[in-house]
Amino acid sequence: MTLQGTQRAMRRLAKGRLLLLAAALLGIATVACEKGTYSVDLFPEMHYNQSFKYGEPPRLSPPEDAVPVTGKAPALTPAEAAAARNPVARTASTVAHARETYRVNCAMCHGDLGKGDGAVGAILVRDGYLAPPNLTAAATQAKADGELYNTITNGVVVMPKFGKLLPDSDRWELVLLLRELARQ
Ligand code: HEC
């Protein structure tokens, strides 16, 4: 082989190596630049399994009728609230269910029949808070169903936000019950 032939062969070899190096760098960059999980999962092992990690307490599945507490409570805009119709029909069973929901969640403040005379209400007044209103009075009853639903969903001052505590249908049922209590 001549000297020139050897030089040409060496140049070809150098070009091939450069190309290989560029390809390797590109590959590393692709794998490394991905945020979070790796774009190319070379060794997934047990990383994504539903397994206990070191030091974690046991994970229990939620009870079947649990209410999710993450995410936004479905509150209505003022315009929607004014126009909303109660999606729950007034039947003996929905009213009875609402009475039970009310007894457990509301009666201690608003009173057994919604007159604003619950035992906790008296404590609120003693401590300088506003008294829970009489929900059967004209001031409350004049409000639209959607407005009452929003108050129950979002709470007011010391009144809890029931959007995170009761399912949607229970809160609409309570609106039904507030109308019912005013009739009694
Ligand atoms: C810790 C006591 C407490 C509990 C529990 C509570 N409330 Fe209230 N609620 C209040 C108080 C106090 C107000 C008045 C707040 C204000 O206007 O500053 C109020 C206001 C309201 C209003 C607004 C009335 C109006 O005229 O705008 C509605 C409707 C209502 N409550 C329904 C309920 C229902 C239904 C429940 C049960 C799911 C409930 N509340 C549970 C204390 C309570």
Image (cartoon, rainbow, N blue to C red):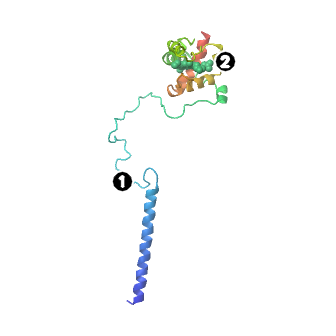
- Judging depth in this view, the residue of 143 and 93 nearest the camera is 143
Residue 176, picture quadrant: top right
Q: Quadrant of residue 31?
A: bottom left
- The picture places residue 124, in percent across and down from the top left corner, at 52, 16
Corner quadrant of residue 154: top right
Mark 1 residue type? Phe
**Disc 2 + disc 1, Cβ < 8 Å:** no
Q: What is the tally of numbered marks visible in this picture?
A: 2
- In the image, 43: left or right of 131? left
Residue 90 visible in rendering: no
Say which residue appears at 61% left-offset and 16% top-offset. 179
Q: Which of marks 2 and 1 is nearer the N terminus?
A: 1
Q: Determine whether, in the image, residue 179 is placed left or right of residue 160.
A: right
Q: Where is residue 44 in the image (x, y as percent from the top left)?
A: 37, 51
Q: Which mark is residue 93?
A: none
Q: Which of 167 and 159 is in front in this view?
A: 159
Q: What residue type is labelled 2?
A: Ala
Task: Classify mark 1: residues with Cα within 10 Å, few (<14), some (14-19) or many (20+).
Answer: few
Using the image, tell me which numbered label, if any, was put on residue 43.
1
**Residue 15 visible within the image:** yes
Q: Name the residue under label 2.
A: 142
Q: Callout 2: few (<14), some (14-19), or many (20+) C-alpha neighbours within 10 Å?
A: few
Residue depicted at x 44% and y 62%: 27
What is the CA distance from the residue labelled 2 to the residue labelled 1?
A: 64 Å
* Residue lying at 41% horizontally and 82% vertically, measured from the top left: 9
Above or below for 143 versus 32: above
